[in-house]
Amino acid sequence: MITEAKLADMIKEAKTGSKQRKFTQSVEMILVFKDIDVKKGFALNEVVQLPKTSSPSTVCIMATGDMGQKAKAAKADAVVGSDELDRFAANKRASRKFINKYDFFLADTQIMPVVGKVLGQLLGPRGKMPTPVPFNASIESFLTRFRASIKVRARATLAMSCKIGDETMSDADLAINAHAVLAAVEKKLPNGDKNMKRIIIKTTMGKPVKQIEEVKKKHA
């Protein structure tokens, strides 16, 4: 696997080579794979917790009763109950708009069947099906974990991209995040790092910085 030091060098080059914008740019990592038969159903759909964070992911909790109250007390980004789910069932446009607002969804196990019936067809293809939250689980712990996480997805394709932080973060912290994502992805590849073709780092509006692989010449 590529070292954190090398990743930090790539991140530094991507940040310094990017023009200053009127907004905070994300720093993204693109992974290109090789020697994988995508026709055999290759897919990645992983939640990776980043060691270093700046802007937390948004989390919506679908719950009623006691868990709904705990979710509100824990200051979840949104808490959706049965009444809201009923309204979503009658308005697909509002459902799509709602789903696009949040990075992660958590749901009380008691209403998971309702969530699947009402929003499953929209959440599934986006890789956003809710993570079940057991009764009496610590809502705060779930929120802490998912706010520090990102979704890593690839479906029937030999490439994927994800946000590893933003340009306000240090090169070292961004490299730690990139390394964590790489470790998680390589565990899911058929042949680990042998299936990794190229790593690319870029800011939102910046030029991509590609990993330069060293070519070792064979001696006669």
Image (spheres, rainbow, N blue to C red):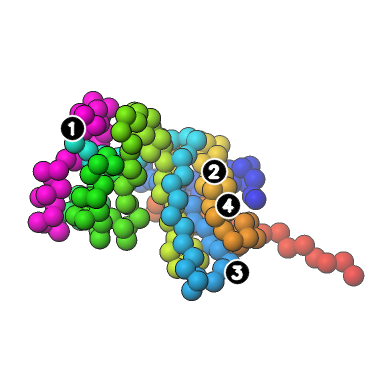
Q: Nearer the viewer, mark 4 or mark 1?
A: 1
Q: Secondary structure at mark 3?
A: loop
Q: Secondary structure at mark 4?
A: helix
Locate residue 139: give its quadrant: top left
Please name the residue shown 18% across and 41% down the image. 80
Q: Any magenta on residue 89?
A: yes
- CA distance for labels 2 and 4: 11 Å
Please name the residue shown 33% across and 36% down the image. 134
Q: How many marks?
A: 4
Which residue is tagged 2? 180
Please name the residue shown 20% across and 50% down the image. 114
> In the figure, is residue 153 to the left or right of 80?
right
Kindly identify which numbered label has been placed on residue 51: none
Residue 19 in view? no
Which residue is tagged 3? 35
Locate residue 123: give its quadrant: bottom left
- CA distance for labels 2 and 3: 23 Å
Residue situated in front as seen by the camera: 138 or 97: 138
Q: Position of residue 31 (x, y in %)?
A: 52, 58
- CA distance for labels 4 and 3: 15 Å
Task: Say which amino acid is labelled 2.
Answer: Ala
Q: Nearer the viewer, mark 2 or mark 1?
A: 1
Q: Earlier in the sequence, mark 2 or mark 3?
A: 3
Which residue is tagged 1? 65
Q: Is residue 89 above or below residue 138?
A: below
Q: Position of residue 136 (x, y in %)?
A: 32, 29
Please name the residue shown 80% across and 65% down the image. 217
Q: Earlier in the sequence, mark 4 or mark 3?
A: 3
- What residue range appears in magenta? 66-92
Task: Say which amino acid is labelled 3.
Answer: Asp
- CA distance for labels 2 and 1: 37 Å
Residue situated in front as seen by the camera: 158 or 220: 158
